[in-house]
Image (cartoon, coloured by chain):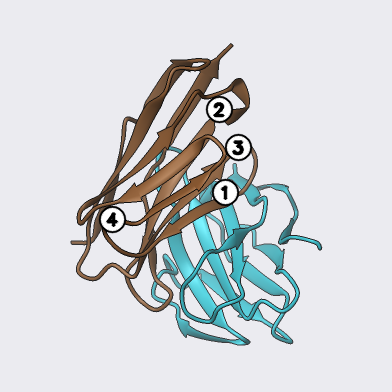
Amino acid sequence: GAGVSQSPSNKVTEKGKDVELRCDPISGHTALYWYRQSLGQGLEFLIYFQGNSAPDKSGLPSDRFSAERTGGSVSTLTIQRTQQEDSAVYLCASSFRLAGGEQFFGPGTRLTVL
Amino acid sequence: EDQVTQSPEALRLQEGESSSLNCSYTVSGLRGLFWYRQDPGKGPEFLFTLYSAGEEKEKERLKATLTKKKSFLHITAPKPEDSATYLCAVQIGTYKYIFGTGTRLKVLA
């Protein structure tokens, strides 16, 4: 079956603009995660969704970051007023289990803020 | 502080030259340790899950083991197609994972 998909694959934007990153998880996967991967850094946890609700938003770097998930499926990560330090690869992962277990990752969105 | 450290950062092997990648962790409560493979421009791909010290898992040329404070990913007779970045992650909460920075493996033909 289809894996996790993300769009766009690449996004170049100007500082101060808003961007939306989309994630389509594997059908039937209830848990959804967003991570950020910067060069030379480990994956940084951003947010976790259990169905449509996000019990933990503690990883969001600032209030410029927000995320939502609708219908227990597609999720959107929005970054407002982008800054150069937001440049990174944003990865989405889904999991069949609500708590723990292996995660299935999408290919990521490479965000470049000029 | 919960921490995951992988070594070496980079490793170059000749085809057929076996070696091990290391993952050390300092966490308050380990719920599972995961190994992933990441190819350039792609997301991590799940390889193994280990839950308790002494556990071992194998897949083709890869073997993962777990001790109380470390995990090892042993690669036997590697091939060029094994070249990738290998990531170690520990689960420390219901849905919280800490990832290491990875080991970049290059296998030369």
| Amino acid type for the residue under numbered disc 3 | Asp
Q: Which of the two discs, 2 and 3, labels the residue nearer the N terminus?
A: 3
Residue B32 percent location from the top left of the image: 37, 65
Nearer to us of marks 3 and 4 is 4
Q: CA distance from mark 3 to mark 4?
A: 29 Å
Q: Which residue is mark 4?
A: B54
Q: Colour of chain B?
A: brown
Q: Which of the two discs, 2 and 4, labels the residue nearer the N terminus?
A: 4
Asked if labels 4 and 3 touch by Cβ distance under 8 angstroms, the answer is: no
Q: Are marks 2 and 3 on the same chain?
A: yes
Q: CA distance from mark 1 to mark 2?
A: 21 Å
Q: Is residue B31 left or right of residue A27?
A: left
Q: Which residue is mark 3?
A: B39
Q: Are marks 2 and 4 on the same chain?
A: yes
Q: Is residue B93 left or right of residue A23?
A: left
Asked if labels 4 and 2 touch by Cβ distance under 8 angstroms, the answer is: no
Asked if labels 1 and 4 touch by Cβ distance under 8 angstroms, the answer is: no
Q: CA distance from mark 3 to mark 1?
A: 14 Å
Residue B39 percent location from the top left of the image: 60, 37
Furthest-right residue in this view: A1
Q: Which mark is residue B83?
A: 2
- As helix, strand or loop, the secondary structure at mark 3 comes to loop
Nearer to us of marks 3 and 1 is 3
Q: Which chain is cyan?
A: A
Q: Which of the two discs, 3 and 4, labels the residue nearer the N terminus?
A: 3
Q: Which residue is mark 1?
A: A89
The residue shown at (22%, 63%) is B27
Q: Nearer the viewer, residue B35 or B66?
A: B66
- As helix, strand or loop, the secondary structure at mark 2 comes to loop
Nearer to us of marks 2 and 4 is 4
